[in-house]
Amino acid sequence: MAADRLARFATALGEAGVDAALISHPQDLFYLAGTAQPCNLLVLPGREPVLFARRFGALVRSETWVDRVRDGAGYRAVAAELGLGPGRLGMELDVLPAALYLKAAEAFPSFEILDCSAALLELRAVKDDAEVEALRAAAALFGAVHEAIAAHLREGVAEHELAAEVQRALRRAGHAGLVAQRRWDAALQPEGMLASGPNLATISGGPVTVSGVGLSRAVPFGASDRRVARGDLVNIDLGLNLAGYHADMARTYVVGSASETVAALAAKVRAVQDACLSAIRPGVTAGDVYAAGLDVARAAGVEDVFQGYDGTHGPYVGHGIGLELDEPPVLGPGASARLREGMVLAIEPKLISPAFGAVNLEDDVVVTADGCALLSDLPRSVFVIDAGRAEAVLP
Amino acid sequence: MAADRLARFATALGEAGVDAALISHPQDLFYLAGTAQPCNLLVLPGREPVLFARRFGALVRSETWVDRVRDGAGYRAVAAELGLGPGRLGMELDVLPAALYLKAAEAFPSFEILDCSAALLELRAVKDDAEVEALRAAAALFGAVHEAIAAHLREGVAEHELAAEVQRALRRAGHAGLVAQRRWDAALQPEGMLASGPNLATISGGPVTVSGVGLSRAVPFGASDRRVARGDLVNIDLGLNLAGYHADMARTYVVGSASETVAALAAKVRAVQDACLSAIRPGVTAGDVYAAGLDVARAAGVEDVFQGYDGTHGPYVGHGIGLELDEPPVLGPGASARLREGMVLAIEPKLISPAFGAVNLEDDVVVTADGCALLSDLPRSVFVIDAGRAEAVLP
């Protein structure tokens, strides 16, 4: 039950020798308290949690399952509830701005403030059944993307015009209109990374693999005004936010017809993804999944373009997803985190090279008792778009 | 000239007794160095600045006007350039996460780290001619919003369906697809706050006045799935990001026909905005502009619904805009910041009440030598939408 999350988080804090945690990030609040309204949530192992509403207490009370709600969320009010200390106070130091941290250090002088985000994200990593269903529904939103691309991708369309159609289709289908990320210095457009032709191999801005180059230097990623030519590859890789839960999916399209090279690349990238999917089960490490993919890329002769080229290789083949687009664990070389049943992972092999652009394939899976299950049944293929129809290159 | 900004920032730091500043936020980097690629920029009064490229130095070199570019941006490399100290180091503590601040404190142990964002934002507040033209071009994007609403707003359309059309129109017109804000715990959809009917008076999520209620509790602001009825007021209030520079504009629409009440409210909100515009000139304070608007709201008998109702009043009537949607100064009660020629301000009076919803009017102006000039010539009125046509309620 969702309300149990608070008790489990309090237990985790207690086991780590942390006396209290103060949670303020919207996605963390939504997970622990059922509301994303501006609040501070004080979690106290062994005591009842207190939710301080920064404003509009009535709205907060109508949404949250926390019983004790106070109006006004200044650190002074929190300090009165927290007590004198000494003690150890967890805060979300990975996202809390330094200025607020310094204010908290002054408000809670007898407390050592430490980062509790990792502990909370570890709890969030294993999804309950309702969350898996929410993530499956988010993955279904990719159907609207696929249809919009089939209908609007043609020779001469500009990347940002295609992005406009994807945004429209997604917002109509219920996309929240933005994606949540734990990033202070990077963001993504709602249509994600949409790029074509040579823009597929120019890595720019915050993303570390396929990024697109954007419409200007000020926002140097995402769709540009480049017009798609016949034979071009087009990638779309995006976060799908439905009622707070995200899918992360990518597909590759080609305008007109697919060359033998493209068909061969499509088969290889799927073979890499298949290897990752086959490796996933409870108990294996995140690094094992990456290694399984790399082995197949090597055997297929595409190791040098796997996740990048010429020293630009992104050191991962996937990551957790949930209330945020990028969650632990990262599936990268040597990553020691062990997979658990109920984790939901995005598996995203891509082959990138100035020679052909990029072939990108991303799908989401839930870790089951003895393996994993895909959350979407969209064919895992490159698609040829011709006259408004999408045809899978691979059987 | 844009490249002078670095020298002016260095001078400001020197005058404040700060020995160096390390800048990492994309909009600040774009302003000072001409690139928004992931970098750390070390500004040293009296010495040449150094730009550390976190990756892809060739791309950074092709974009920046900074001469000294180094590859690799770890704090260790920065420390070697910074020297031993002791000294005072400015960082963007309003946006830098606490975890990175603590890492910096360890990497630069002989430096006192203080917040330099206010000094930089003060510099950014006064726009040069090219920036004013960029902001004027951003304001022109609202034309695409207005046309999309005229074409698609009708009885029975859902707020999020209308938002989808606005997103599409904006992205096609060159909108960057996202808005930049200096916020760690809040974000806005690209179509901003789009709400109708009773949703206009429910203030939810991060925004402090008209917010909409969103599609779910997880993202509890922006467009909802409420279907618009005949006679409903509809507000759209959004950031328009064109090549990094933002406009912030709002208009109110009514479906079918406007009642006398609506026409009267439209006249009053414009009178409040007129009073603010008349008060703006170099040398007056931000508080003077707010007071001028409040005086007219009081004389018009709408003080109790000016910027909110029943204790929800947002204490401002405007703010600066530029590379971010919300910049200093805030035009609020008693605000002492003095206006300067070249500042660009959004003036956004709104009347909000459960009795009628909200009438919202926001326009952007540049402060001139003896007053101010509007950046858009769209009529400052409520519009009636009927059969795909928009008609201004006010002459």
Image (cartoon, coloured by chain):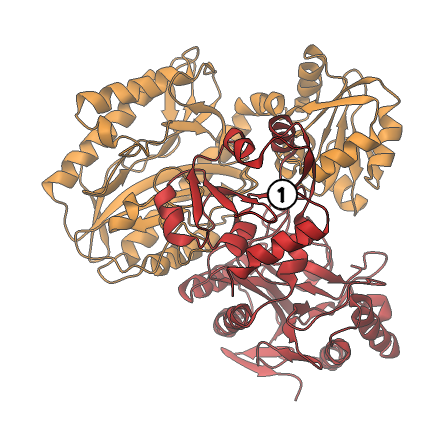
Chain colours: A orange, B red
Badge 1 element = strand
Q: Nearer the viewer, residue B328 or A391?
A: B328
Give the letter of the chain under mark 1: B
Q: Residue at x 37, y 58 (%)?
A: A160
Q: Residue at x 68, y 36 (%)?
A: B87
Name the quarter where the C terminus of chain A is drawn: top left
Q: Nearer the viewer, residue B11 or B322?
A: B11
For residue B338, above or below residue B375: above
| Count of picture labels | 1
The residue singled out by tag 1 in the image is B20
For residue A8, above or below residue B55: above
Three-letter amino acid code of the residue under disc 1: Ala
Residue A18 appears at what percent x and percent y? 73, 16
Residue B222 falls left or right of residue B88:
left
Residue B214 appears at what percent x and percent y? 61, 51
Displayed quadrant of residue A98: top right
Residue B240 appears at what percent x and percent y? 54, 63
Q: Residues within 10 Å of mark 1 (few under 14, many from 20)?
A: many
Q: Which residue appears farthest toward the bottom when viewing the image?
A: B395
Instruction: Say if residue B324 shows up in the picture.
Output: no
Instruction: Say if residue B319 shows up in the picture.
Output: yes
Q: Which residue appears farthest toward the left when viewing the image?
A: A260
Displayed quadrant of residue A259: top left
For residue A171, above or below residue B382: above
